[in-house]
Image (cartoon, rainbow, N blue to C red):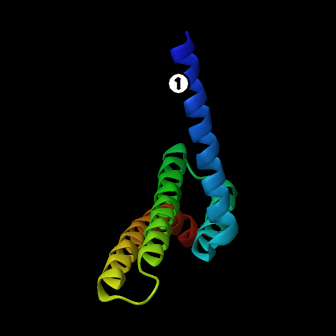
């Protein structure tokens, strides 16, 4: 029984840290602020255009993907800056790769957004 309680307490602590990390991202990182704002606009658009459940699933997945990868990119940048605060070619290369991952996620999300909203916009 004690082991089960320990496991549950550990999971609750992890959840608390995750919520706090999300809060820090939204409050301090401009790229996350922009992504969050765009996400809210897309959610409003989803209700306005009454998109299907399938479209909602794709939209939520796309939003989660972009914000998650953006958060990982931020973590990579912070670690890289901590390890080597001055400019260094290898650190720049690592940061560029992380930014490239965000780019791929953003392109995928934009493609999903076009599939969802373009038909609604063209028929109005």
Location of residue 86 with respect to 119 vertically, above or below: below
From the viewer's perspective, is 91 left or right of 9? left
In x, y percent, where is residue 25? 62, 64
Location of residue 20 with respect to 95 vertically, above or below: above
Quarter of the figure with the N terminus: top right
Give the residue drawn at x 44%, y 88%: 86
Give the residue drawn at x 52%, y 24%: 7
In x, y percent, where is residue 2? 56, 13
Q: Nearer the viewer, residue 101 or 2?
A: 2
Q: Quadrant of residue 100?
A: bottom left
From the viewer's perspective, is 7 left or right of 83? right
How many labels sit on residues?
A: 1
From the viewer's perspective, is 24 left or right of 115? right
Give the residue drawn at x 56%, y 40%: 14
Give the residue drawn at x 36%, y 69%: 101
Q: Nearer the viewer, residue 101 or 110?
A: 101
Secondary element under disc 1, as helix, strand or loop, is helix
In x, y percent, where is residue 67? 52, 62
Which residue is identified by label 1?
Answer: 7
């Amino acid at each position: 029984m004690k082991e089960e309680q320990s496991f549950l307490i550990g999971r609750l602590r992890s959840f608390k840290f995750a919520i706090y990390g999300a809060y820090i991202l939204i409050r301090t990182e401009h790229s996350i602020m922009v992504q969050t704002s765009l996400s809210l606009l897309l959610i409003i658009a989803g209700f306005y255009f009454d998109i299907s459940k399938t479209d909602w699933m794709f939209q939520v997945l796309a939003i989660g993907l972009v914000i998650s990868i953006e958060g990982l990119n931020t973590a990579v940048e912070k670690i890289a800056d901590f390890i080597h605060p001055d400019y260094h070619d290898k650190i720049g290369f690592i940061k560029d790769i992380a930014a490239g991952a965000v780019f791929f996620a953003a392109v995928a999300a934009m493609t999903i957004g076009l599939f969802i909203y373009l038909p609604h916009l063209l028929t109005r």
